Image (cartoon, coloured by chain):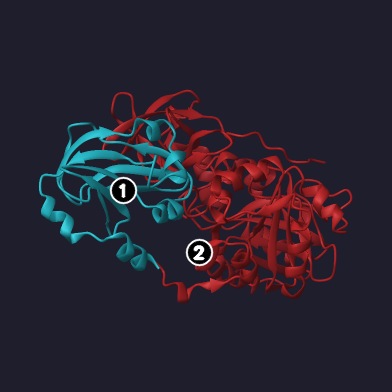
Chain colours: A cyan, B red
Amino acid sequence: MTTYFTADHEWIRVEGNVATVGITDHAQQQLGDLVFVDLPEVGRVVVKGDPAVVVESVKAASDVYAPVDGEVTAVNDTVGAEPALVNSGAEGDGWLWRMTLSDPTQLAGLMDKTAYLASID
Amino acid sequence: MTDAGDLKRLPLEHLHVAAGARFGGFAGWSMPLTYPPGVMKEHLHTREKAGLFDISHMKLFAVAGPGAAAMIARACPLDAAAIAVSQSKYTFFLNEAAGIIDDLIVTRLGADRFMIVANAGNAAVDEAHLMEIAAAFDCTVTPLDRVFLALQGPEAAAILAGVGVDFAGLTFMHGIEPKPGWFMTRSGYTGEDGFEIALPPGEAAAFADSLLADGTAMWIGLAARDSLRLEAGLCLHGQDITPDINPVEAGLMWAIAKPVRATGGFIGADALRAKLDAGASEKRVGIAPEGRQPVRGGAPLFSEAGEPAGRVTSGGFGPSVNAPVAMGYVSAALALPGTKLFAEVRGSRVPVSIHSLPFTPHRYVKG
């Protein structure tokens, strides 16, 4: 199990050919209190860089991009009902969706945690 | 994005840094957007107890001289000679087409003295406009350098009394000068009881600390200031009112007294009378989105039949309402509360209904 990070503040945790995606704790801090999460349909095919989810804070709406190509296999309905869970557990219970990886070589272009934390410092 | 280096800095910035504020650019100023509790808690704390806002980005103009009232009556649709000393009035600078250059609070401080409080984003435009008008009158216009603080919420009066500021008898939309160089009104931008207090920068840090000392009030950022004013149905100039919108469409004619409408010699008077005769083709309304998804400023509105119906000018989430809230303009025929419309958000249509303003009741202490 390896977790990668994007410059757009998503994390992607890969187990075999399936991955879980969410936003980083830094991202949730920057966004502030979330009040709405617009989750994708299960089965939707996403391409790296596509806006897959929209998270809305009191003040603004922000896109969450697919870090890699694949198909959405599950969404976190709990955060749909309780968006504040993304604030309290961005890199845990506040995950957003699960997806297959159609091109695992794309992971090589992402950052590890150390590189990500250095990028936001 | 504006380069942070180009932004004006608040005189009390060090206090906001110490309080853990996140800053962002607004109207040319580096402003505290949120503090560690976050916008939701800050908003609710203001409605439940009290919030302290640094609004020093706003501009104060002192107007003085035998021609002061006549000058203001030319600049604003307001009979300045008729307002009592200590009374404050919400008014505007209008252009020749009756569009709103800025919205203001004018307070009479003496026979020949007034204070004008204007928006940060329009400070330079307002100053030039005011100076040009004032040249024809026997009065002076002096922009003031003050720290300007707003203390808002049900505990605001008790906190202010506790730090020795004498405001006995001061009711909503009245103003006084409690100390030399100070100016305060009982008013605000949240719908709550509260005060806006301008004071010399050298006295401000100690005063702000004293207001926060017993822990009842906390610093509130610009994000919660916006959600509070939106729930209260109050306009943000540049979004909900602009130089292309007149007070008839904006539903702000309550701020212009009937005799002033009929015979006032203010800039924009002819255009405003023509608009009044013609009636507004669109009206400013509250908009309540169904469900939890916020509808933001800029979203187009459509009738149930799919015809263009108007636009959202401000929108977000209302923490006290615990639902999304918005404001905008719709065709006059669709402005009745309860009317069902759709807002277009990211290509899909969100059902909304017209809602009366404010979303949360005002709790002003009136005279």
Position of B361 relative to A54 (above/below): above
Tell me if mark 1 has few (under 14), some (14-19) or many (20+) residues whose alpha carbon lies within 10 angstroms of its own.
some
Q: Quadrant of residue B65?
A: bottom right
Which residue is tagged 2? B27
Q: Chain of mark 2?
A: B
Residue B281 circle label: none
Residue B203's x, y, as percent? 77, 72
Quadrant of the rendered image containing residue B254: top right
Quarter of the image for the C terminus of chain A: give it: bottom left
* Residue at x 83%, y 56% (from the top left corner): B85
Check disc 1 and give the amino acid type.
Answer: Asp
Relative height, residue A3 to residue B318 (above, below)? below
Which SS class for mark 1? Answer: strand
Q: CA distance from mark 1 to mark 2?
A: 25 Å
On the image, which quarter does residue B146 sit in? bottom right
Across and down, in percent, residue B200 comes to: 75, 72
Q: Would residue B4 be seen by someone viewing this image from the given angle?
A: yes
The residue carrying mark 1 is A63
Is residue B64 in view?
Answer: no
Q: Considering only vertical position in the picture, is B2 above or below B300?
A: below
The residue shown at (82%, 41%) is B367
Q: Is residue A51 left or right of residue B301?
A: left
Q: Is residue B112 above or below residue A55?
A: below
Q: Is residue B138 left or right of residue B92?
A: right
Q: Residues within 10 Å of mark 2 (few under 14, many from 20)?
A: some
- Residue kind at label 2, given as amino acid type: Ala
Image x and y of residue B116, in percent: 68, 62
User: Residue B185: x percent and y percent?
Assistant: 76, 55
Output the chain of dot 1. A
In this view, the residue in front, B149 or A35, is: A35
